[in-house]
Image (tube, grey):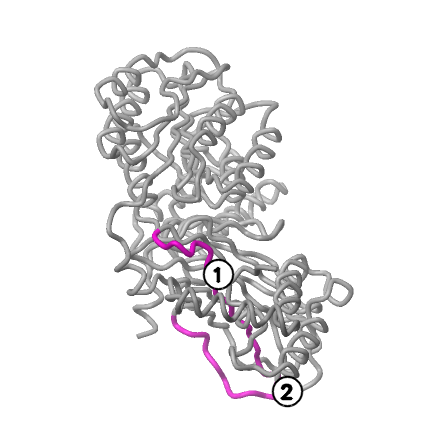
Amino acid sequence: MSVDSSRNLYAILGLPSEATPDDIREAYRIAARRFHPDANPNEGADIQFRDITAAYEVLGNPQRRYSYDEERRARGEEPDYFSLRVTPSKRVLNVLDEPQVLYLLLEISPLREAAKLKKREVPLNLTLVLDRSKSMKGIRLDKLKIAAHQIIESLSEADRLAMVSFSDRAEVLIPAGPVADKTALRAQVNLMRADGGTEIFHGLQAGVEECRKNLSDEYVNHVILLTDGRTFGDELRALELAGKAAAEGIGISAMGIGEEWNDEFLDALASRTGGTSTYVSSPNAVVRFLNERVRSLGDALVERLRLVVAPDADIEMESVFKLQPHPQPLEVAPQPVPLGSLEFNRALTVLVQLQMPPSKRTGFRTVARIDVTGSVLVAENRLYKALSDISIEIAENPLPEDPPLPILEALGKLTLYRIQEKAQQSLREGNVAEATRRLENLATRLLASGQDELAQMAIIEARRVTTTNLLSEEGRKALKFGTRRLLSQFDPRDDAE
């Protein structure tokens, strides 16, 4: 029976290739005590235990192990495509009778050897889903057409493109296919006319169907949605569609222009598929943001990158936030968590927040096992996995320990984002004074960090809240996406060196 030699089964069990049968059995027993579903209720533990069991079924069987080793030798040594470095906020935790927060900074970095494999641009299977509702009439639609023209010009014949326009119904302007006759494609874009209401599901459904026509592991398969309005009654169907698209390997990025669209909905669409959601404040910014997103997709080394976090049974994963290169809050469930693409020229960083249980016993303990898997687009051996198992020490009165600089900087900027979130929450709960205080605090911190324009917006919104008990949609979105964007302005590798 043939086995898949493309995955390093020894790494999954945490063993060298020369491990003895006793080593293999012991590694499996230890893993079962930590991650078996009967012992650990975390979803990530169940997923990783299935991988561990599959690895043991091969390596624990002498004949299957021999076949696996022979196939690996025949294939040759697999290059390392990306690395995973995990840095905890504390190496030593104090003995406490109450829960403690522990942060893990995940840095997924393309390795130089892998970057050398890039001989050409990675082909795109791209679908643009563009809002042409009545509210897009005028400069918004004009700028959208300019952006679409520029994207067409930037693509090659190796790429695949489709374009869908929608209002209260969807129309396929450019059926999925090669980018050949660019003049004809630009002419199709010019046919868009603004009319009707906004129903995103119809447009997204047509866009995903077009993307499916050229769906391939050799492409970056992505849908970019741009809208300026809210959709009503079809959000759940759109989110269900996003989940199905993610399972097939299709990412969705969403851009909202103006103030009327539902940012929580677009965040959820993007989070479920490994895409990004963006606030485009003006029609002039549409061209830049769309072109930048397409360029970043074309720089992918690894696509369909997925994260599985398996905390120990007594540890809770509270939040996951992608910091770079495109900051995005992520949903902790279901796992695997889609991370999107890893680009050739920059790392992808993620901050995981764990709640540690009260600790009464001193000594070392395991915390979590991290698994990052993705499809390497430039290699014949497409699936690649990186693993890290994290442990810390529990001690009585440990020496004072500051978090590593990369985590400090990330937390400092993430705090700004969370302050505006808490201000909105206070306002929803009717606590106007608390919301005002948080906005004023945000303004002070933004001024201290040199973000004068955002600080001024926070001051204006604080004053508005005291008189109207409301945030303006423009101010709310500007603060939310403005503070989020600050997270992309630091490089943890620079701080660590």
Q: Which quadrant of the view contains residue 323?
A: bottom left
Image position of 39 (left or right of 334): right
| For residue 148, above or below residue 433 | above
Q: Position of residue 419 (x, y in %)?
A: 49, 53
Q: Indicate whether residue 68 is drawn in magenta.
A: no
Amino acid identity at mark 2: Gly
Q: Nearer the viewer, residue 417 or 68?
A: 68
The span from disc 2 to disc 1 (Cα, nearest Å) is: 37 Å
Answer few, some or many: residues within 10 Å of disc 1's Cα (few below 14, many 20 plus, some between 14 and 19). Answer: some
In the rendered structure, the answer to whether residue 361 lies left or right of residue 329 reads right
Where in the figure is residue 493, as x and y percent of width and height? 33, 68
Residue 358, horizontal then vertical, whole percent:
70, 75
Residue drawn at (31%, 25%) of the image: 144
290 with respect to 418 (left or right) = left
Image quarter of the N terminus: bottom right
From the viewer's perspective, is residue 273 above or below residue 347?
A: above
- State yes or no: residue 386 in magenta: yes
Stretch in magenta = 378-405
Q: Which mark is residue 6?
A: 1
* Quadrant in the picture for residue 238: top right
Relative to residue 28, is residue 461 depicted above or below? Answer: above
Please report contact status of discs 2 and 1: CB closer than 8 Å, yes or no: no
Q: Nearer the viewer, mark 2 or mark 1?
A: 1
Q: Quadrant of residue 219?
A: top left
Does residue 264 sit above or below 43 in this rendering? Answer: above
* Residue situated in front as seen by the camera: 456 or 365: 365
* Residue 432 x/y as whole percent: 56, 43
Work out whether residue 245 or residue 61 is closer to the camera in this orientation and state it. 61
Whichever of callouts 2 and 1 sits on the residue coming sooner in the sequence is 1
The image's mark for residue 363 is 2
